[in-house]
């Protein structure tokens, strides 16, 4: 119970209406709306009541109360999904949204978002059309496949493929490929949700062509699946048949083969000093009947699950009920089409940010790093490595130049950078804060240097 002194003090606490009638209160109401401001005022004044009752504190002035209200409103309405500067050197950083988009892709998404569109409308006939048409022609032209389909991510693409082609039937897959992807999702669990029956062959480190042959001879296999090991390498005492060999065995038994490529490279990664990643076109040329991959990994576009391959098989997927549950929206379709256009024009390396980063000249990276040190008046230039990341090319690294900052408390400094506007994400190695110019977009460089200067003060 508040003592008489506290009760007397609380009588001076301004009411909600009194605070709203002030100039500052009216401005907050204009900025945030009546109901939200009232809720914030009640929460702040409730805190004041409790503090006065507990500690006998004095009642703050109305302008002080409203300052606290404004801070609370800012906290309530601050977006949780906000742009950051990625100085980690991880190009496809899953936690930071994977692939940044090209200017043309962003423009296409904006145009689709600003008003109505021909998402499912045919201008010529004036009748309903299909959203699946928007990216399909480009997918066919770029990959050489008979048909294409886009859903909301690669996991749902795989689930749709299995549900449409192997529901309640056996799908053959090697134990060397039963991976767990980000967030704890496992290939066997995704397969189970599709209704397909998982038929495992081989061991965790070795599978032989005879394992495929024996399973196909002895069991009623409906589908053969090859899954990309997106986030680890299989090394040591290992063996696996080639895709061409598996395809030959599957096709001799008239069984379709699905290749879950995951990263979806359309360019040869070997020309950039990385290990060769099988491209979508190479998979199709090897005989895969259906290939699926992500839109926001090595493709460099928005999130999506892309499926290409034989038209009769993809037609079955379009007609399956799950297709509606996992369909891509207009923004993803517009963005994916714009990204694919870069490949069709032969300009992907120049236009798509992740390929700009992968192909970035070491001399340019060094020049940028030295410029940062001149502006910051501190730092050491050190050699380092950038990673592709995002479940693509595990273990592969690109040489880079880093700016190393000697900071007394590196973890505290990283936390300070994360609170900047925009937040800066860096990394710590050997008690030094490391900044990699490769993954900092050119248009973000000025903001990065301002925030670093502020943090170093």
Image (cartoon, rainbow, N blue to C red):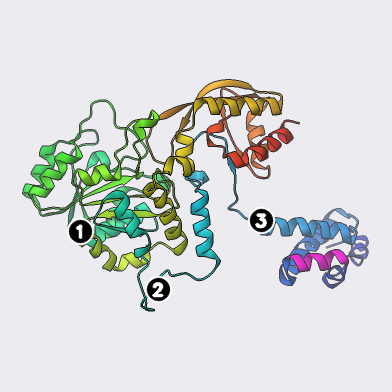
**Is residue 9 in the magenta section?**
no
Between residue 419 and residue 202, name the one nearer to us: 419
- Secondary element at image label 3: loop
- Secondary element at image label 2: loop
Give x and y (percent) for residue 295.
40, 50
Give x and y (percent) for residue 216.
10, 48
Magenta residues span 23-31
Q: Quadrant of residue 127?
A: bottom left
Left or right of residue 309, residue 337 in this image: right
- Above or below, 77 against 324 in this view is above
Left or right of residue 336, residue 158 in this image: left
Q: Residue at x 70, y 28 (%)?
A: 376
Give x and y (percent) for residue 395.
39, 30
Give x and y (percent) for residue 375.
70, 28
Tell me the distance, in whole angstroms, between the alpha carbons under discs 3 and 2.
Answer: 37 Å
- Of the residues under marks 3 and 2, which one precedes in the sequence? 3
Disc assigned to residue 121 = 2
According to the picture, the residue beneath numbered tag 3 turns out to be 78
């Amino acid at each position: 119970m508040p003592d008489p002194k506290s009760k007397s003090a609380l009588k001076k606490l301004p009411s909600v209406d009194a605070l709203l009638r002030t100039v500052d209160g009216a401005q907050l109401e204009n900025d945030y709306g009546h109901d939200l401001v009232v809720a914030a005022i009640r929460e702040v004044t409730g805190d004041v009541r409790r503090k006065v009752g507990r500690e006998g504190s004095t009642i703050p002035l109305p302008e002080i109360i409203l300052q606290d209200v404004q801070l609370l409103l800012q906290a309530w309405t601050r977006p949780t999904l906000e742009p950051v500067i990625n100085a980690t050197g991880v190009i496809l950083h899953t936690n930071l949204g994977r692939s940044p988009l090209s200017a043309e892709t962003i423009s296409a998404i904006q145009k689709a978002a600003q008003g109505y569109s021909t998402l499912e409308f045919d201008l010529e006939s004036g009748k309903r059309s299909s959203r699946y048409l928007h990216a399909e022609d480009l997918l066919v032209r770029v990959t050489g496949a008979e048909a294409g389909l886009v859903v909301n991510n690669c996991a749902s693409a795989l689930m749709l493929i299995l549900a449409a082609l192997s529901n309640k039937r056996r799908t053959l897959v090697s134990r060397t490929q039963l991976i767990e992807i980000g967030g704890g999702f496992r290939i066997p669990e995704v397969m189970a949700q599709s209704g397909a029956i998982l038929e495992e062959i081989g061991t965790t480190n070795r599978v032989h062509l005879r394992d495929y042959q024996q399973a196909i001879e002895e069991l009623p296999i409906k589908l053969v699946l090859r899954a990309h090991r997106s986030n680890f390498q299989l090394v040591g005492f290992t063996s696996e048949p080639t895709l061409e060999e598996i395809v030959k065995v599957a096709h001799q038994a008239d069984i379709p083969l699905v290749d879950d490529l995951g990263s979806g490279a359309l360019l040869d990664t070997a020309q950039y000093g990385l290990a060769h990643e099988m491209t979508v076109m190479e998979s199709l040329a090897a005989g895969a009947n259906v290939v699926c991959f992500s839109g926001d990994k090595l493709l460099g576009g928005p999130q999506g699950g892309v499926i290409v391959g034989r038209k009769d098989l993809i037609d079955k997927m379009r007609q399956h009920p799950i297709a509606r549950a996992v369909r891509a929206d207009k923004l993803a379709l517009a963005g994916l089409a714009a990204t694919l256009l870069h490949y069709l024009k032969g300009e992907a390396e120049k236009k798509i940010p992740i390929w700009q980063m992968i192909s970035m000249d070491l001399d340019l990276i060094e020049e940028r790093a030295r410029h940062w040190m001149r502006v910051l008046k501190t730092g050491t230039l050190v050699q380092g490595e950038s990673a592709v990341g995002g479940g693509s090319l595990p273990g592969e690294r690109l040489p880079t130049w880093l700016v190393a900052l000697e900071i007394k408390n590196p973890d505290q400094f990283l936390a300070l950078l994360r609170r900047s506007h925009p937040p800066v994400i860096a990394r710590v190695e050997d008690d030094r804060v490391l900044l990699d110019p490769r993954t900092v977009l050119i248009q973000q460089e000025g903001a990065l240097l301002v925030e670093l200067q502020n943090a170093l003060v």
